[in-house]
Amino acid sequence: MTHDALLSAQGIDKSFFGVKVLDGVDFSLRGGEIHALLGENGAGKSTLVKILTGAYRRDAGAMWLDGQEVEPRSVAEAQALGIGTVYQEVNLLDNLTVAENLYLGRQPRRMGMIDRRRMRGDAATLLARYGVGADPDETLAHYPVAVRQIIAIARAVDLSGKVLFLDEPTASLDAREVQALFTVLRQLRAQGLGIVIITHFLDQVYQIADRVTVLRNGRMVGSRAIAELPRRDLVAMMLGRELAEATAHRGSGATQPDTPAAFLFEGYGKRGSIAPFDLDIRPGEVVGIAGLLGSGRTETARLMFGIDRPDSGQAAVDGQPVTLHSPQDAIGHGFGMCPEERKTDGIVGDLSVRQNIVLALQASRGWARPIPRREADALAERYIKALDIRPPDPNRPIKFLSGGNQQKAILARWLATDPRLLILDEPTRGIDIGAHAEIINLIEKLREDGMALVVISSEIEELVAFSTRVIVLSDRHHVRELRGAEITAEAIVEAMAVPGDAA
Amino acid sequence: MTKLKQLRPQLLALAVVLVLIGLISPGFFSVTVQNGRLYGSLIDVGVRVAPVALLAIGMTLVIATKGIDLSVGAVMAITGAVAATLVADGHSVPVVLAVSLALGLVCGIWNGVLVAFLDIQPIIATLILMVAGRGIAQLITGGVILTFNDPAFSFIGSGAVLGIPMPILIWLAMGLAVGLLVRRSALGLLIEAVGINRRASMLVGVRARFLILATYAISGLCAAMAGMIVTADIHGADANNAGLWLELDAILAVVIGGTSLAGGRFSITASLIGALIIQALNTGILMSGWPPEFNLIVKAVVIVAILTLQSPAVADELSVLRGMLRRKGAKS
Amino acid sequence: DLTVGFSQIGSESGWRAAETTVTQQQAKERGIDLKFADAQQKQENQIKAVRGFIAQGVDAILIAPVVATGWDEVLGEAKEAEIPVILLDRQIDAPDDLYLTAVTSDQVFEGKVAGEWLVKDVGDKACKVVELQGTTGSSPAINRKKGFEEAIAGKSNITIARSQTGDFTRTKGKEVMESFIKAENGGKDICAVYAHNDDMAVGAIQAIKEAGLKPGTDIKVVSIDAVPDIFLAMQAGEANATVELTPNMAGPAFDVLEKFKADGTLPPKWIQTESKLFTQADDPKGVYESKKDLGY
Amino acid sequence: MIRARYLPFVATVLIFVVAYALCALQFPNMLSFRVLGNLLTDNAFLGIAAVGMTFVILSGGIDLSMGSVIAFTSVFVAVLVRAGVHPALAFALALAVSTSFGALMGLTIHALKMPAFVVTLAGMFLARGAAFLISTDSVPISHDFLKQLKGIYIQLPDKGKLSFLAILMLLAFAVGVILAHRTRFGANVYALGGSEQSAELMGVPLRKTMIQLYAFSGFMAGLAGLAYTLYTSAGYSLATVGVELDAIAAVVVGGTLLTGGSGLVLGTLFGVLIQGLIQTYIVFDGTLSSWWTKIVIGMLLFAFIVLQRLILLVSERRAAIRASSGG
Ligand SMILES: Nc1ncnc2c1ncn2[C@@H]1O[C@H](COP(=O)(O)OP(=O)(O)OP(=O)(O)O)[C@@H](O)[C@H]1O
Ligand SMILES: Nc1ncnc2c1ncn2[C@@H]1O[C@H](COP(=O)(O)OP(=O)(O)OP(=O)(O)O)[C@@H](O)[C@H]1O
Ligand SMILES: [Mg+2]
Ligand SMILES: [Mg+2]
């Protein structure tokens, strides 16, 4: 066999705890191509990337770079070979500054000392390419996940001499940033770099990729040029079955203004975070929240759920004024919330899937009333089946699940509490198209069952698909509310561009 | 039964340590009944481990929340001093017990408030009481060894029920009580959740601050009990030395028991076995007849050996090795 | 009126507490303003304290040195500032022009007194002794061991069978004694225990009793310090002998200091305190009464 | 405007200055170059050790072996010098031993994936035990070389001295500051403290950094041991028990987070000075009994920590308000 590709791998095997998650995977990447690596949640994409970039050791197989057999034992070695990577969960360091993150391990030096001034300058130049105005001297913790994502990409791109791996880089980016990223990727392709991108957005695949490789259950299903692969066939390849994609607005659940609002926020706001807003939510309603990055969507959710304390306005549930000064308060009134940052705010890594699923319910019952093991098993089994969490093992520590499956488990956690109002911040982030459709169906079904939902999403099509109303945010102001037939992708995009103080 | 399997490394280490000691001093395993009371070196290990075992119970919970409690030694001194003062003043045992335990609880709550509500880093928060607490204890005793002569109270330290010395019964009972409390309620799960990811736990409505406070309170209670046992044992309160550096032994016991200092999953039983390993080692050194200059070296070497064998890295290597052997066996 | 700085080691034992109390009492009686600094067992803290005293310009400095070495420099500074220094209860390795005098016992001698008592007491009978050492590396532990060994040297009937550290504490004294008893045939082979201080001896006595033996009879108990509690044990016949280390080091120190300040009388470089042996014959009850309020 | 990450440092400095002023008000003698010089000299060995401890803590680790290593070094040097080895050679040997000891601990922590707390606790037992084996007696040393070293100082007004030890400590801090903020090693240490896993995925060589880190802390412990040897002209196996806790307290009071990744080396200097100040104050006061000394140290430590938190809280609040009015 010849290894004339830029990077190729053959017969890659990997097992965790005796379970094979990669089974004889072959992969090859040419220079000057953008190669999409696709597959369902848990198919083994991230694991393959980690193996090819030195983060994990493979059990069997071999890899070649430029025809030379290589064996990176650490990420540092891979970087030295010219392989740059953005891993799925943004792996940057919150405690370092933006510039330090960008140049960790390769800081410009003068006379053996780090040249901080030059590092700052370089960082600013680098970020400017992506349209991010982050202060190179500020700690990363200051910035939301999207900005961090871009910084991680900028870092990886900058240090990849030959190959660039991007594991779901666009998950938390909005359309504008995605385009900025793609522009950069195209330039890199023109320079002869080989780029591997993992994403669950098929639109993006068709927009940017030259070739796709599909994994299913740890095996390679096939590798094709994108031009000769219709969308329907691609989906079938990934899922092993056909899927009816639905994205049009279903017009379902038109608002019922006659029913009184069960959840009411009036003049609710917090200085420095979100301008005072009014919001009313009825049972059986999905309120979508749209906005650009940093427009204050997450802040709205945090305020409603009692994580941040408001400094103006009041909230009422069923007509009774309530104080929501902590998540416990909110949960006590039947609220639930899936946070945006899964790794830091969502999963409790070392606990099992079952324990993660029952955690919210247990917390609301109090420590003195433990959920009996039988009930916990039943709950876990039910939601693992309902949301198709894979592998369907309730005893596995959740940190060993793939990203998308973790997201499902967190969703299950709140469903188990049977909330009256469920706030979902980017619920479909990192979820494969099969599961994506399932979650949209689930939202639909919960709404029909009379639950009130607030869903934040960067995917406008998806908002259009399930929302009964859409609130559009801009510059930390609620600028527009769209109802019924007004809800179209164009209308949302248009409203997002309205400056915040114009409202 | 999965439980026993999880405890295997600790049990194995304990067995190895015991066997080694048995080789050095052959009389080690002989247990007889004397004056209606079990008697022998093995029993001594059980009795002498009581303070560290009790501390390790509380420490396990604290460490599970990602904390650490350096003050337990000082709390022992305080409660011991107070107990001795009360006993010397002729108060009845129930009063002494109640007051001392309450005091331990107060100390624990103080630590808990600093850590959970003022968000002071646990090492420093408890260092404050570690330094000041011993001073408080000395203030109570006036720096002298406060002796008393009260058979009822001394019973805690040197009495026996059905031939089993009280200290053994106390730490067993406390271990059982706390173990049941955290495992039969949801406390254990919630404590682990807080230790693994406090932010996420708070977002699902877990009262993290309350739980953290509770663990330090329990740790204070355990320290109070340990303090009373030590006091009852020597019929006096030695504020200067009671519990000195015992916090390190307790932490070590927890670590040998396999609970990670980074918080999260914990096992009280394993910590107790850890404490037994340390005490067996101490007693073994005393029985060996080696000069005291060697004590620390021997202790360090054995601990390093145990932890090395238990370490995840070595466990991985071993399982790989085992797998290879099995495969080879299958092939041939 | 004099202002005197006193750098005390710490408060690790009852004896130490008594020394502090007695020093304060003595100062008060003489109208001396005593500045007290507790070093928490650390030499560096003592040095800091002495420097602090010098900076404050005290009239004299008392030091109970935690260790013999390492004083040259700071005592040099005191000398330069013309502040006389008196050492309490321990000698140091430094030129003796750096301090006015040292009021101490002779720790080796203490051990020797204890050993000689035992030699006399057992006569020609074979005797296996177990030894409870002080904190490993501390000077009383080293010296008291040495003195005892000197006293029994040449007596082939007396041997030290086991020797372990009991850290000068009751708890450890008891624990170590327990293991000695188990290791030596249930204690039947042990004829005497020598403890480097009384606290360990008290712990050992409890261990002996709990093993069903009679301390003072089955196993003889000899120790050093003469703290009140050991006299109670002696009175009960459970301890046999102790060697006194007086907590009143400050009295003689203030005496010579006052003379020195008055007319420059130079005292001898070493004022040795008495290392008196007490046995059950010496009215333990009476001694206890006289000592119990001294702050032990 | 002060950046949020410098706030703990600023708070520490502020507290130190205010506290010193208060002390000086009560005891005017304390406001002298002599006391200031003493403050630096007397805490030199602690300061040097604390530099090493700062790095270890910045990485999210801890080094409990420091006190024992200091004692070991002092005994080791003293015994060598007594045996006729030139002090300079003895110093070099001691540093080599302590550095390798640290490196070995770092290797153990990394290779066996054991927590630093336990490995260094075992290291603490080992080093102390080794010191006992060399000599339980305290061993005095005197040598012209040592006298020459001590003869190096800068005279300050009113009998104050910036002694050799003080200079050595300030140098150690200077080296620490440069190492932490101007070298890749320092950046890697901060990275480890942020998240070991992320650092690894960003290409930080874990093994190398870990070994270098603990070797550095071993080196600093050794250097602190040498400083201690010079300070007392002796080696003693029971010396500096619990100094690691003092060093940790100094690091934390200096504004470094024990969880790692955040803090400044210079903050530790002020942490050390604050501790020294507390002790100096207690000596000047001179009325505290042994137990009140402990209680007061505890209370002052508490006061400093709470004050620091308050300053941080207030300034965070102010920053939030400023942000809202500005945006
Ligand atoms: N460290 C680990 N330990 C044990 N199992 C693991 C580990 N990492 C991944 N797995 C398992 O390996 C399988 C593949 O996971 P991987 O993260 O590669 O999936 P993925 O294709 O990236 O999915 P997603 O789209 O959800 O990110 C999953 O079943 C997961 O549970
Ligand atoms: N491109 C950017 N450059 C710099 N800062 C940004 C950028 N985008 C957002 N921010 C900062 O992010 C913060 C708000 O982000 P936040 O995550 O709350 O918004 P959001 O609307 O919820 O967006 P999303 O959840 O999609 O990330 C603000 O502090 C804002 O200054
Ligand atoms: Mg993945
Ligand atoms: Mg958001």
Image (cartoon, coloured by chain):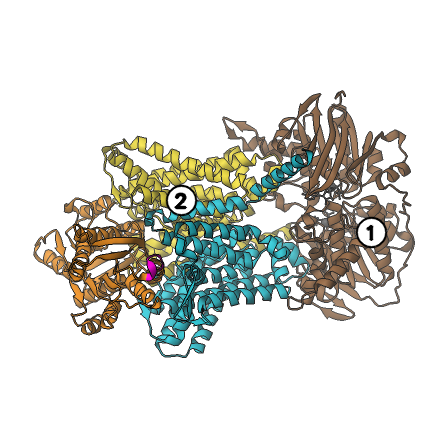
Q: Colour of chain A?
A: brown
Magenta span of residues: C182-186
Q: Quadrant of residue A140?
A: top right
User: At 64% across and 64% down in the image, what residue appears?
Assistant: B186
Residue C19 appears left or right of B15: left
- Looking at the image, can residue D263 be seen? no
> Which residue is under mark 1?
A439
Q: Which chain is cyan?
A: B
The answer to which of A469 and D76 lies nearer the viewer is: D76
Secondary structure beneath disc 2?
Answer: helix
Q: Is residue B330 above or below residue B171?
A: above
Disc 1, SS: helix
Residue C271 shown left or right of residue A149 in the figure: left
Give me the chain letter of mark 1.
A
x and y percentages locating residue D78 in the rendered image: 28, 39
Q: Position of residue C263 (x, y in %)?
A: 7, 56
